[in-house]
């Protein structure tokens, strides 16, 4: 391909995507937050912490120099964790030229502002052409070239098609979509549903209950999304149900594992200590709870998750109160026929 | 509740639903195809073949006398396997009074006619008020009162609400829906996607590939459904994605298990011998392939499944050809923006 690409953020997902793009013969620079980390990656030629064994080819170079990373790139990929997106964007901004395509591959919502990550980046780097990529894509599988399918959303189809061209090959399939907001919301809020699915698993409530929770959880996200300007169909796609499935059913997912511990009766504090890493779903539960209030959307699963996580409600009680809600039509917006 | 209910068909799902309704203090009669089977169930007070250990209460009585079973019932539940639906409906017809509510809980398509099961029953019992129930509901879990959520669709909301009232309790939640065709198609065709998901598992292609297959498989089913008069939203609900999730991820599913064997390299014949029971997905793959042609709908996953099952295509080749299709927009009906 021979494109020049910067990947900003050397966590597991940023590293996996840098590897994918480098394998396709692009010149890839991978930016780390810390000089020490960047030096270590260059010396080890692999990310021993997150993706041990996946060796860096020569055309993948690490750096902590943002100016060097961003100079004259065909594509900038942003992979910082959601809590670090704003600060990272601030550091990037002076080096981003007019209409530079920046594709965000991180997922989450900004605490406080309740912004999606593209809203944060557009505020900090107004000259950028911001796109997002999401879908069922565990880094561990992408790093070893297992077949993966994602969706990329952008304001202009031309931008989405440019990113599709750069990424797509026989093991990484990319669809385009015009709905940036929908693609982002699915990827962010699915972590809360994955946490709840873990709780159902921890309670040993079975496959029927878990599938129902995932389905109704997605319906809530779609209701919120529509109020925020997203398209309902997007939530039936790779960034919606696809990502939800992979996050709720795989043991790769920290959110799912954390939920299992909570369902088994561990406290939130103990769970977070046990899982060690950031559990996005916990923070996102609070943000989604706020968004539901702000947009006046009925989100019973998010409400119960909030009660379990932050108000000490018994997880079993929470599931049973979902079962015993008023009798409903499946599509709550539809008039009874 | 004290309603009088007939359940026609004493396989695992019919038996589980009879148990559920009997636990709620209804007078339930369970009809078997064979006198011998009916006698055995009455003697054993459990279904030792399909649901060993789930004891029948006194208000659950088995019979092979269709006239006795159907006389003066508040609700008739039809649970025969799809290939036996037409013959069973023929036997039922003389005993069904005008506007008797018959809710079909079986899933599948009729070979040859390509009819949904409600179309078959309406043809054979035109005086009945036919409804359907579907959703993520493994019989093994319902039999032991694990939390389960389903959807019931009927022509009149009053009919759907009547069935909802009879079934719903603290472990069995029922939503209503007006879209009979959508609810039926999701339940039928998901078995083909589950078979394909099993193939992906058998090939060890990973969680990303499996989630993508499920998502894009659902998109195909929804495209077909819309052409057949169903509503797209239905496929995002319990009878669509909910049932698909439970069928693709649980080892309870024969379709999923059969797919794993095929993905591991076993022939279709060997696989069917190994799994022992009816694998609905194999027959439905042929029917869905026909429907796609009839309605001129693009269904690449169904086409590849058909090639693997009936034309000897290598499963790995089939998955890779799905990955290498033309670059697409996620919502294929949408104009490029």
Image (tube, coloured by chain):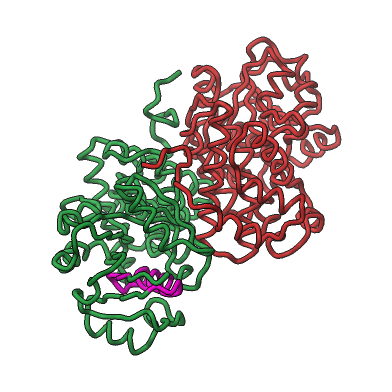
Chain colours: A green, B red
Report the residue at 43% width, 28% height from top: A329
The residue closer to the viewer here, B295 or A200, is B295
The residue closer to the viewer here, B38 or A167, is A167
Q: Which quadrant would residue B180 be assigned to in this image? A: top right
Instruction: Give residue A268's position: percent from left, percent from top.
Output: 30, 62
Outermost residue to the bottom = A43
Please say whether residue A314 is visible from this viewpoint. no
Q: Which quadrant would residue A294 be assigned to in this image? A: top left
Q: Is residue B260 found left or right of A277 in the rendered image?
A: right
Q: Is residue B306 found left or right of B135 in the rendered image?
A: right
Which range is magenta?
A5-26
Outermost residue to the right = B36
Instruction: Give residue A32's position: percent from left, percent from top.
Output: 26, 76
Q: Is A98 above or below relative to B65? A: below
Q: Quadrant of the N terminus of chain A?
A: bottom left
Q: Is residue B21 magenta?
A: no
Please say whether residue A176 is visible from this viewpoint. yes
Instruction: Give residue A238's position: percent from left, percent from top.
Output: 45, 51
Q: Quadrant of the C terminus of chain A?
A: top left
The residue closer to the viewer here, B18 or A141, is A141
The residue closer to the viewer here, A189 or B301, is B301
Q: Is B166 above or below relative to A282? A: above
């Amino acid at each position: 391909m021979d494109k020049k690409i910067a990947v900003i953020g050397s966590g597991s997902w940023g590293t996996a995507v840098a590897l994918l793009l480098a394998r396709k013969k692009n010149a890839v620079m991978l930016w780390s937050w810390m000089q020490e980390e960047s030096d270590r990656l260059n010396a080890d030629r692999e990310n021993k912490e997150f993706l041990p064994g996946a060796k860096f080819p020569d055309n993948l170079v690490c750096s902590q120099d943002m100016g060097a990373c961003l100079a004259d790139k065909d594509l900038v990929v942003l992979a910082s964790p959601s809590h670090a997106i704003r600060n990272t964007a601030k550091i990037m901004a002076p080096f981003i030229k007019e209409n530079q395509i920046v594709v965000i591959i991180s997922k989450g919502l900004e605490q406080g502002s309740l912004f999606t990550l593209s809203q944060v980046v557009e505020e900090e780097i107004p000259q950028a052409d911001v796109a997002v990529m999401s879908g069922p894509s565990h880094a561990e599988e992408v790093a070893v070239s297992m077949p993966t399918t994602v969706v990329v959303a952008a304001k202009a189809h031309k931008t989405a098609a440019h990113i599709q061209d750069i990424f797509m090959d026989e093991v990484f399939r990319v669809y385009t979509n015009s709905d940036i907001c929908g693609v982002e919301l699915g990827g962010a809020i699915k972590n809360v549903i994955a946490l709840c699915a873990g709780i159902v698993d921890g309670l040993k409530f079975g496959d029927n209950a878990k599938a129902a929770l995932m389905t109704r959880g997605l319906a809530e996200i779609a209701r919120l999304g529509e109020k925020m300007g997203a398209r309902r169909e997007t939530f039936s796609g790779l960034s919606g149900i696809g990502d939800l499935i992979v996050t709720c059913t795989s043991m790769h997912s920290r959110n799912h594992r954390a939920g299992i511990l909570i369902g088994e009766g561990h406290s939130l504090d103990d769970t977070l200590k046990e899982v060690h890493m950031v559990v996005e779903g916990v923070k996102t539960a609070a943000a989604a709870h706020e968004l539901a209030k702000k947009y006046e959307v009925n989100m019973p699963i998010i409400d119960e998750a909030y009660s379990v996580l932050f108000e000490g409600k018994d997880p079993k009680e929470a599931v049973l109160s979902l079962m015993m809600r008023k009798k409903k039509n499946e599509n709550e917006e539809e008039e009874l026929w």
